[in-house]
Amino acid sequence: MATLLDGKKTSSDIRIEIAEKVKIIKSKGGKIPHLAAILVGNDGASETYVSNKVKDCEQVGFTSTLKRFDNSVTEAELLKEVEAINNDPDIDGLIVQLPIPDHISVQKVTDMIKPEKDVDGFHPVNVGRMAKSLPSYISATPFGIMQLIERYKIETSGKHCVVIGRSDIVGSPMSILLSRKAYPGNCTVTLCHSRTKDIKAMTLQADIIIAALGIPEFLTGDMVREGAVVIDVGITRVEDSSKKSGFSLRGDVKFDEVAPKCSFITPVPGGVGPMTRASLLMNTLLAAEKSIYK
Ligand code: GUN
């Protein structure tokens, strides 16, 4: 049976490590890491995500600032706020919670954030630096997955990794990170997507599978070979009348079929999800320490 890659425990370890570092900074009278978040409108999911990010900051001892705007905010007003935060020496990291209303260009807003404060790792400068193996902020989910691989000491060198899904925030960066000359990395990577002819033929050759396509229980037992490492990035809500909330979370992996064949596997929930939250804290600490851009 597979070893569970426990994101809940690992992310809790990371939070403890960060809180310890903040204590040391405080005891030396240093500057407390400070994250700013911009939230536009009142989308329920975004409200939850941002309030969790603020809570996470409090928990580890960071300072946080939340700037809220109505849906009616103009692009110019939003860009002006980004600029003001870029120039505020007390703020180390800035995120603009997505989605934002259609009348505002995501690209313009993302590009306006100073790369040095872009703790989401969405700015083209950070994506480009990552691709060139230069120090960069890595966006939260890929960073969290890399941490899980590293902390469980999973061998990656020379392995065949199949990534399913080519999104800008997960699939594409994972394919780059795992092919870099580094640890974790040095994999031979196959990136599968909606136009791939025979995904099963690919996954059956994989030592490591990253399932990040957003289709519940897509990866079934017959698609995985014995001993594979399986990372499940999916978190789709499906109706479930047995739950108080009325829904439960499903990953992209049919866990009951796949787990018995694996060497390591992430559960859903409790795998990649909590690691994503911890990653933003790691990036904010890196920003405060000026570790990426010296
Ligand atoms: N919306 C959903 N996920 C994210 C994220 O990681 N960062 C931002 N800024 N918005 C999001």
Image: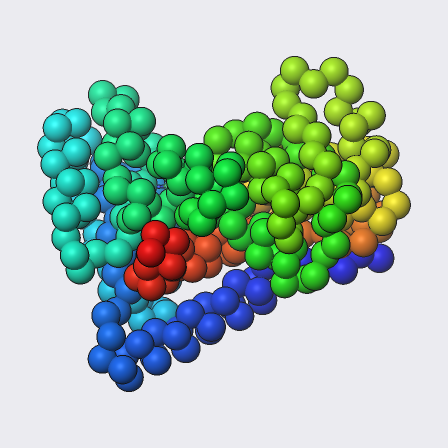
**Front one among 56 and 145:** 145
Front residue (pair 89, 219): 89
Q: Is 197 located above or below residue 269 in the figure?
A: above
Residue at the image position 55 percent from the left and 32 percent from the top: 172
Q: Using the rendered image of the protein, determine whether residue 206 is visible from the camera's viewpoint.
A: yes
Q: Residue at x 31, y 43 (%)?
A: 115
96 to the left or right of 78:
right
Residue at image coords 15%, 40%: 83
Q: Position of residue 132 (x, y in %)?
A: 50, 38
Screen quadrant of the C terminus: bottom left
* Residue 157 vs residue 207, the one in the foreground: 157
Q: Position of residue 187 (x, y in %)?
A: 71, 41
Residue in the image at 72% along x and 56% along y: 154
**Residue lying furthest right:** 226
* Residue 29 image-quadrant placement: bottom left
Residue 116 percent across, percent down from the top left: 30, 48
Quarter of the figure with the N terminus: bottom right
Number of residue marks: 0
| Colouring chosen for the image of the structure | rainbow
Quarter of the displayed picture in which ligand 1 can be seen: top left
Image side of residue 164 versus residue 222, left or right: left
Instruction: Kindly indicate the quadrant of the structure image that contains residue 166.
Output: top right
Residue 241 is at least partly visible in this image? no
In the shown orientation, is residue 174 left or right of residue 76?
right
Q: Position of residue 27 (x, y in %)?
A: 28, 84
Picture layout, residue 62 above or below residue 203: below
